[in-house]
Amino acid sequence: MAAAAAVSLWFSTTAYRRRSYYSSRRHSSLPSVSRVKVCSPILSTGIKSTLRTRICSYQDDGEFLLDVESDKPREECGVVGIVGDPDAARLCSLALHALQHRGQEGAGIASLDQGKIESVVGLGLVNEVFSAPSKLASLPGSMAIGHVRYSTAGAKSILNVQPFVAGYRFGTVAVAHNGNIVNYHQLRADLEDHGSIFNTSSDTEVILHLMATSRSRPFSARLVEACEKLEGAYSLVFLTQDNKMFVVRDPHGFRPLVMGRRSNGAIVFASETCALDLIQAEYEREVQPGEVIVVDAGIPNSPPAISSMCLMPHVVRKACVFEHVYFALPHSIVFGRAVYQSRQTFGAMLASESPVPNADVVIPVPDSGFYAALGFSEKSGVPFQQGLIRSHYIGRTFIKPTQETRDLGVRLKLAPVQGILKDKVVVVVDDSIVRGTTSSKIVRLIKNAGAKEVHMRIACPPIVGSCYYGVDTPCSKELISNQMDVESVRKFIGSDSLAFLSLDNLRDSLGDEAPTYCDACFSTNYPIPPPKEQVPPDMVLPL
Ligand SMILES: O=P(O)(O)OC[C@H]1O[C@H](OP(=O)(O)OP(=O)(O)O)[C@H](O)[C@@H]1O
Ligand SMILES: NC(=O)CC[C@H](N)C(=O)O
Ligand code: SF4
Ligand SMILES: [Mg+2]
């Protein structure tokens, strides 16, 4: 079907106005595949992280991974877009602060003013990238998009930090992407066969090339045509030279994306509602899976016009349930559900499913285990206490680069409260187990503090599969629950008992919506088959 014909109009409303731009940033060339992801297997004695040059791609699950320097689980990205506020770039930077938990490798903002798109990108946290006031001052205009990055494809390099700004036949475009394109390598190879020259090693760049090489017009038709070739997860915001913002969510709707409005009428798009809250934008609705929203701020003397189209074909939504388990902030509404309540429900169901009859106290593993522990305590009637105190001067251990620093990170981050734990039967609730590092350290900490028994309760099912849709979890051989059964994991972490929320109960907690959630990392029911590519040995880079 022709791309233009694949666009069906949903609705169209009017609202305000805006200006124009022109591009700036150039990218230097990188090799077509700069890294491959390697992993080391979990051994019964612990997690071995030294065999970092072994390729995962020949595993029996056909796994192909992309990141040579990463034997770690990572998170995903956050995107934001603002139309119609004279302070757009500054608001973007605040919104990115709110989304910082979604990506800490790099951050950037692109703004549009008087026919030019300017961008500032950098490695590190938002406040590091924008520490100099001159950075935001160099981003004038009332339209802007922003990004915080955790790479799923392509190196942790300044070249891959978004927004990307690119020139093509009809002007300049900036893009920010949360997600992961599963057929990226195939698409890239095809594009290169036809002469495309890539400037980055990020999957996001194929989207720009697909749009640039499309014969369709206008931009929205190019975008739809490009999206029809993509398999995988994409929540995208684009800024174009003709004062338009385009916002897209893939048909499965893996990653979240919401729309809100400020009291001055400015329209805001963001990965999570916590970003809307911070910049005082009122939540209006989700960007629907498969929806393309166009905000045209270039209509003289009128407010921006908002129109909406849908991508073909329609498929069942597969929203990422792990957003509710771990990733999203608890005060966000994600996929129309309050994250805080989801976690409390997971904890309550866990309490019914795997009670600890003689327990004296329920304690959370801070921070993200907190809400499930509350639910567990409420349901079981066992008192809730904070038996572990978190230092706020150390980052998330989930994202530390080596096993050694992750181990130390847990001890630096959490301190036991002896008065709460000594001589007690303690239920410890965490949201998830990935490699088992956190749980094993915590059990030891609590036992050393004098606890009589330690019972670990995990408010999600065992993670047995890697994610291909925007969360850079470790390859499956590094997932402790992929390598061991529950009893072996219990022995590994050293607790007196261990129980996970069952997949059935996780699904029950989602009610009628359960089939509209992806739970592939727990069930291995992948909505889009994982890539099967194999990497030639000569593509393994030395560390
Ligand atoms: O089994 P592991 O490989 O140790 O990983 C699992 C842990 O990682 C995450 O916490 P993290 O400490 O990263 O961050 P948090 O403070 O947000 O919970 C998660 O909440 C688990 O506690
Ligand atoms: N985690 C993400 O959403 C990353 C976006 C994109 N795949 C990248 O690697 O930059
Ligand atoms: S595989 Fe897991 S982390 Fe990835 S989208 Fe599905 S539920 Fe989310
Ligand atoms: Mg944690």
Image (cartoon, rainbow, N blue to C red):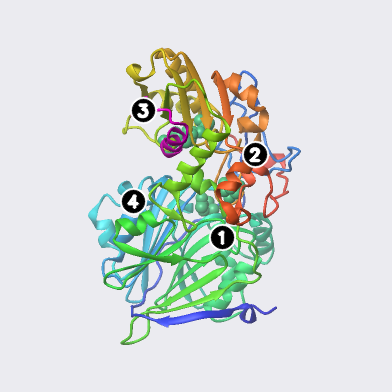
Q: Say whether disc 2 or disc 1 marks the residue closer to the N-terminus.
A: 1
In front of the other: 183 or 462: 462
Asked if the residue under mark 4 is in contact with the one under mark 2, i.e. CB atoms within 8 Å, the reply is no
Q: Which residue is mark 3?
A: 385
Q: Position of residue 150 (x, y in %)?
A: 48, 47
- Amino acid type assigned to the residue bearing label 1 in the image: Gly
In front of the other: 270 or 406: 270
Q: Nearer the viewer, mark 1 or mark 4?
A: 1
Secondary structure of the residue carrying tag 1 is loop
Q: Nearer the viewer, mark 2 or mark 1?
A: 1
In front of the other: 169 or 12: 12
- Amino acid type assigned to the residue bearing label 4 in the image: His
Asked if the residue under mark 1 is in contact with the one under mark 2, i.e. CB atoms within 8 Å, the reply is no
Instruction: Find out whether residue 389 is within the magenta segment.
Output: yes
Q: Which residue is mark 4?
A: 97
Q: Is residue 64 left or right of residue 94?
A: right
Secondary structure of the residue carrying tag 2 is loop
Q: Which residue is mark 1?
A: 253
Q: Say whether disc 2 or disc 3 marks the residue closer to the N-terminus.
A: 3
In front of the other: 141 or 440: 440
Where the N terminus falls, by quadrant?
Answer: bottom right
440 lies above or below 504: above
Q: Nearer the viewer, mark 2 or mark 4?
A: 4
Over which residues does the magenta segment extend? 370-390
Residue drawn where x is 60% and y is 57% of the image: 516
Secondary structure of the residue carrying tag 3 is loop
Q: Which residue is mark 2?
A: 540
